[in-house]
Image: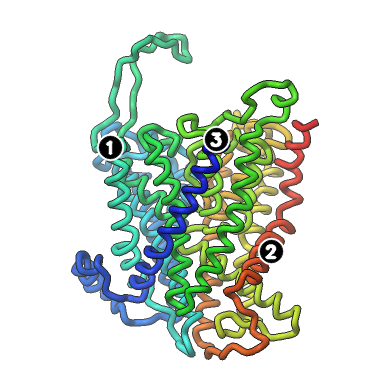
């Protein structure tokens, strides 16, 4: 069993790396406005969009204008998704007659999907109409991912520019990212998923007769089951490719109509990291130094494997209590995707938290304490280990800037990255990018712990905690780590759909998305105005194994210094308790 798991993981990493280069080169051409094969097919639509919107794609914006467009677009998107949920009861494509979503849940969900978090405090099949799922949530899966790619492209242009004032055109970036990258990949993935049995229909739920009668919770005899259906395959494709993660069904990719086969499971898991990994190649191509991109990809892969391997080992070993009782087969199967095995469940959990994806095919709340710690810690690193589409790489580039600054201090030299001097302004903005998710995570967790419970029936005082003690704290810490890092996965014993968490979570998701994007764009604008300085003897090479080690060390040190005390109150002490 364990050998098979390692073979599957090795195959996954191999396919990911093989796909990263060609896709990355293609995306570089798209973001540089070059003509590609997809431009021949959809170029007319691009030109029509630009004409209708009055957009000149060749006009380059300064960082403040670029940022204002990001915020304006996101606010409008939030209002659209909020309105669709509140009005869905009177809108079409609602065969189940679902009523309007509550105001606080609508706000939380709108903030979630616009920020690429896709945190879900609701059951999709029993809460959202087909129109809301498609026009609201699926559209935002494309839009929020395109925004991340656009901000990354702006930062890359800032790094490679030589005294320019602009960092690109926001509307051109998101249009081309959607038309030429996200849409074609999503169509291919959707067709494959449909071939595997992922449902894609406008028909309403289906009632089927049970082969054996069952006794319901109220004691009545149940002879039939209602099977939810809908246009799921199209949403599943972009939820993975766009590192969104919001499931059409409540149990996400553990649902047999959302991930029916081993092939669909593998491709969905591959889709989580596909674009983030390929964007490293895109970065190298766009700055004219491909080794720079491979160095960042190597750092991400090293960190990914550092967390993946112990997660798999912990779940294969299972609960120490079972081992002490000399029980055979003591691996932790609780909450796992039994169709695909422990290795696939652990791989998915690591990939979805390394990226800001958040989709699940197993119950993270049922992982062993240390098995759940590693996915939680991956989010707390800022989701820069591959990370979200665009957002992961621009976060890692900020860490690279901090790394060269630290290295410069060690040798007494002004730090440089790709020929650009890193000054006080860049370091102030980089500090904001690194610290804001940390502050939001810990502050929101603390507020939730001390806030008096006003919701009847919610256990453990702090709203939503289904367990007492260390595991209850782990639930709370995990879920605000998820929201504050725009991930969206959860320790699902946590009851999130209450007024308190809906409001606080919405604020946390917005702060963690846009209070990072604006400093990143400010760094891009500042670097764009600087002249490129030729490398000298004292310049630190940023494409070597030494730099990869330094970069990984900085990421881990920042995460450890910030979160080890909190982790010690949750999963670490829980592990010690069950190991006694």
Residue located 29% across and 63% down the image: 179
Q: Quadrant of the rendered structure where residue 90 is?
A: top left
| Badge 3 element | helix
Residue 219 position (above or below residue 102): above
Residue 71 location, x and y as percent? 45, 66
Residue 258 location, x and y as percent? 37, 37
Disc 1: which residue: 94
Residue located 69% across and 63% down the image: 553
Q: Earlier in the sequence, mark 2 or mark 1?
A: 1
- Assign the N terminus to one quadrant of the image: top right
Query: Dot 3, how many residues are within 10 Å of its Cα: few (below 14), some (14-19), or many (20+)?
Result: many
Cα distance in 3D space between marks 2 and 1: 51 Å
| Badge 2 element | helix
| Badge 1 element | loop
Query: Dot 1, how many residues are within 10 Å of its Cα: few (below 14), some (14-19), or many (20+)?
Result: some
- Between 238 and 144, which is closer to the camera in this rendering? 238
Q: Earlier in the sequence, mark 1 or mark 3?
A: 1
Q: Quadrant of the rendered structure where residue 252 is?
A: top left
Report the number of discs.
3
Disc 2: which residue: 553
Residue 3 location, x and y as percent? 56, 38
Residue 231 location, x and y as percent? 29, 41
Q: Is residue 374 left or right of residue 154?
A: right
Disc 3: which residue: 342
């Amino acid at each position: 069993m364990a050998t098979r798991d390692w073979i599957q993981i090795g195959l996954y990493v191999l396919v990911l790396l093989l796909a990263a280069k060609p896709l990355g080169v293609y995306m570089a051409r798209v973001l540089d406005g070059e003509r590609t094969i997809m431009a021949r097919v959809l170029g007319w639509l691009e030109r029509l969009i630009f004409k209708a919107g009055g957009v000149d794609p060749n006009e380059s914006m300064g960082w403040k204008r670029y940022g204002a467009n990001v915020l304006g677009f996101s606010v409008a998107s939030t209002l659209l998704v909020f309105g669709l949920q509140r009005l869905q009861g009177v809108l079409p494509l609602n065969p189940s007659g679902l009523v309007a979503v509550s105001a606080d849940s609508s706000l939380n969900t709108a903030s979630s999907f616009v920020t690429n978090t896709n945190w879900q405090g609701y059951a999709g099949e029993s809460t959202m109409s087909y129109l809301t799922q498609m026009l609201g949530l699926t559209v935002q899966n494309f839009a929020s991912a395109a925004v991340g790619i656009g901000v990354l492209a702006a930062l890359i242009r800032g790094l490679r520019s030589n005294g320019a004032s602009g960092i690109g055109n926001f509307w051109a970036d998101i249009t081309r990212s959607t038309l030429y990258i996200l849409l074609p990949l999503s169509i291919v993935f959707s067709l494959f998923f449909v071939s595997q049995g992922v449902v894609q229909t406008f028909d309403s739920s289906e009632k089927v007769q049970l082969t054996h009668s069952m006794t319901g919770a109220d004691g009545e005899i149940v002879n039939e089951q209602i099977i939810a259906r809908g246009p799921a395959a199209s949403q599943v494709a972009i939820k993975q490719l766009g590192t969104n993660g919001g499931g059409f069904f409540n149990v996400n990719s553990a649902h047999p109509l959302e991930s029916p086969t081993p092939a669909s499971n593998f491709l969905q898991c591959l889709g989580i990291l596909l674009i983030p990994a390929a964007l490293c190649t895109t970065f190298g191509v766009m700055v004219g130094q491909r080794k720079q991109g491979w160095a960042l990809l190597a750092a991400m892969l090293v960190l990914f494997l550092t967390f993946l391997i112990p997660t798999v080992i912990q779940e294969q070993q299972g609960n120490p209590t079972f081992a002490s009782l000399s029980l055979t087969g003591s691996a932790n199967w609780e909450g796992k995707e039994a169709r695909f095995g422990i290795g696939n469940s652990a791989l998915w959990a690591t990939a979805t938290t390394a990226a800001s994806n958040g989709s699940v095919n197993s119950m993270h709340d049922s992982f062993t304490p240390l098995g759940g710690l590693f996915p939680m810690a991956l989010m707390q690193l800022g989701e820069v280990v591959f990370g979200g589409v665009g957002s992961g790489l621009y976060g890692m580039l900020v860490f690279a800037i901090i790394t060269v600054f630290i290295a410069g201090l060690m040798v007494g030299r002004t730090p440089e990255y790709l020929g650009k001097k890193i000054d006080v302004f860049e370091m102030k903005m980089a500090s904001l990018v690194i610290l804001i998710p940390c502050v939001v995570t810990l502050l929101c967790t603390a507020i939730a712990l001390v806030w008096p419970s006003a919701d009847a029936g919610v256990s453990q005082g702090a709203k939503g905690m289904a367990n007492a003690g260390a595991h209850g704290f782990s639930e709370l810490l995990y879920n605000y780590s998820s929201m504050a890092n725009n991930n969206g996965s959860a320790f699902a014993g946590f009851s999130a759909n209450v007024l308190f968490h809906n409001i606080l979570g919405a604020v946390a998701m917005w702060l963690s998305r846009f209070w990072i994007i604006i400093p990143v764009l400010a760094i891009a604008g500042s670097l764009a105005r600087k002249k490129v300085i030729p490398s000298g003897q004292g310049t630190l090479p940023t494409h070597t194994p030494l730099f990869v080690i330094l970069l990984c060390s900085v990421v881990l040190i920042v995460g450890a210094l910030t979160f080890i005390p909190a982790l010690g109150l949750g999963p670490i002490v829980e592990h010690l308790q069950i190991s006694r």
